[in-house]
């Protein structure tokens, strides 16, 4: 990896970091949901600064090409993240249902008292 | 004994009044509540104009969420028996008091109105019947009891099951799944022969493509329920 590429990647990562930071600051993104993204960025940044780590992990996992290792880990990360999102949605769904029912029943009581 | 019919209604402007009148005339002793599940037609206006007793859901919750609202309504108001009764006019209120008698006399937890005991009245399409048979068979395999009309929306329950369903009820296509769950809890469920009518107005919520999804989803849900037993 050339130094130029390393710098470009680092710049891009820092830009992403600022984006996420901005979203959290503006409360468009809840802080706890930004954590996995921050973790990902830090890991990528470390890999960018010390490319030797990539080769080392690739060997450790018994994978031949570093690019395959990166794809594999990237997919793994995406899978875990999306899975946690669907469980979050399920929980929200259930809560929303309870609230909607509660509102409807309360409104019914109100209408009856009028 | 306080008894109530819970009428889930999604876009039933043409039939809902008729359904309520049917209950008032042919099921003495039954109160009713219409659950208007955010219909996009004039169901709400029709309910108001005709002075029907209805609960208005602010967002669509689907049949399961709607009926569950009804169970919570019934519990809040101290009902002992609740029956789910379709808003499209397919069910016949004349059976309700007979079903209530069976529920109390046989001390059952649930009485299901079944089209397939006497095989009279509207029998649904051939494909649907195969699907319903298949669910009966799947439930028999997992619980040991045959249910001839597991998808029937005409189901009467007592307080015990109202409480269970108010806390936890499937969102869509709830009937076969919740029946299996209750059988696995050793609840007593019997079927009562009824005739149903063909839908005259409105649109069925189950299209051909949806029915494939229905089969797969409900099968998996029933198996899931079995693993939780
Ligand atoms: N609360 C609620 N009720 C619904 C919804 N969709 C349908 N329903 C009601 O559920 C009942 C049964 O729906 P149908 O579409 O007739 O289903 P079905 O009786 O199994 O199918 P058909 O035999 O084709 O009529 C009716 O009273 C509908 O108004 C929904 O999204 N929410
Ligand atoms: Mg129907």
Image (tube, coloured by chain):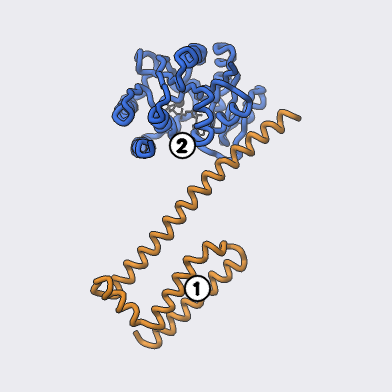
Chain colours: A orange, B blue
Which quadrant of the figure has residue B82?
top right
Give the vertical position of B50 relative to B169 (above or below).
Answer: above
At 40% from the left edge and 80% from the top edge, which residue is drawn? A48
- The residue closer to the viewer here, A102 or B43, is A102
Q: Quadrant of the N terminus of chain B?
A: top right
Q: Secondary structure at mark 1?
A: helix
Image coordinates of residue B229 in percent, x first then y, are 38, 36
Which quadrant of the figure has residue A109?
top right
Q: Is residue B212 visible?
A: no
- The residue closer to the viewer here, A86 or B19, is A86
Is B78 situated left or right of A83 in this image?
right
The residue under label 1 is A16
At 38% from the left edge and 26% from the top edge, which residue is drawn? B150
For this orientation, the residue located farthest to the bottom is A3
The answer for which chain carries disc 1 is: A
At 64% from the left edge and 23% from the top edge, which residue is drawn? B52
- The residue closer to the viewer here, A59 or B90, is A59
Quadrant location, ligand no. 2: top left
Q: Residues within 10 Å of mark 1 (few under 14, many from 20)?
A: some
Is B90 situated left or right of B128 in this image?
right
The residue under label 2 is B170
Image coordinates of residue B66 in percent, x first then y, are 54, 33
Image coordinates of residue B10 in percent, x first then y, are 53, 32
- The residue closer to the viewer here, B28 or B166, is B166
Q: Secondary structure at mark 2?
A: loop
Q: Is residue B172 visible?
A: yes
Image coordinates of residue A3 in percent, x first then y, are 39, 88
């Amino acid at each position: 990896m050339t130094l130029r590429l390393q710098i470009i990647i680092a710049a891009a990562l820092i830009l992403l970091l600022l984006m996420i930071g901005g979203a959290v600051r503006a409360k468009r993104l809840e802080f706890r949901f930004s954590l996995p993204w921050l973790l990902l960025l830090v890991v990528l940044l470390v890999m960018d600064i010390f490319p030797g780590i990539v080769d080392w992990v690739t060997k450790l996992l018994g994978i031949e090409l570093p690019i395959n290792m990166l794809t594999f880990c990237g997919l793994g990360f995406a899978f875990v993240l999306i899975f946690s999102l669907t469980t979050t949605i399920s929980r929200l769904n259930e809560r929303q249902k309870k609230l909607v029912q509660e509102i409807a029943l309360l409104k019914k009581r109100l209408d009856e008292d009028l | 004994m306080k008894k109530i019919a819970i009428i889930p209604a999604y876009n039933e402007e043409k039939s809902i009044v008729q359904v309520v009148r049917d209950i008032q005339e042919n099921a003495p002793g039954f109160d009713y509540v219409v659950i208007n599940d955010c219909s996009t037609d004039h169901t709400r206006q029709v309910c108001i104009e005709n002075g029907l007793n209805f609960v208005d859901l602010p967002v669509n919750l689907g049949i399961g969420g709607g009926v569950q609202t009804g169970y919570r309504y019934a519990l809040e108001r101290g009902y002992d028996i609740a029956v789910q009764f379709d808003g499209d006019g397919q069910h016949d209120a004349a059976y309700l008091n007979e079903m209530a008698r069976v529920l109390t006399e046989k001390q059952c937890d649930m009485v299901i109105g079944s089209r397939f005991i006497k095989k009279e009245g509207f029998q649904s399409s051939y494909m649907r019947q195969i699907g319903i048979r298949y669910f009966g068979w799947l439930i028999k395999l997992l619980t040991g009891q045959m249910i001839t009309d597991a998808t029937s929306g005409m189901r009467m329950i007592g307080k015990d099951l109202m409480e269970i369903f108010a806390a936890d009820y499937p969102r869509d296509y709830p009937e076969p799944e919740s029946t299996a769950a209750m059988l696995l809890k050793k609840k007593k469920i019997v079927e009562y022969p009824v005739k149903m009518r063909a839908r005259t107005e409105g649109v069925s919520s189950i299209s051909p493509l949806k029915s494939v999804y229905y089969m797969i989803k409900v099968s998996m849900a029933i198996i899931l329920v079995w693993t939780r037993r």
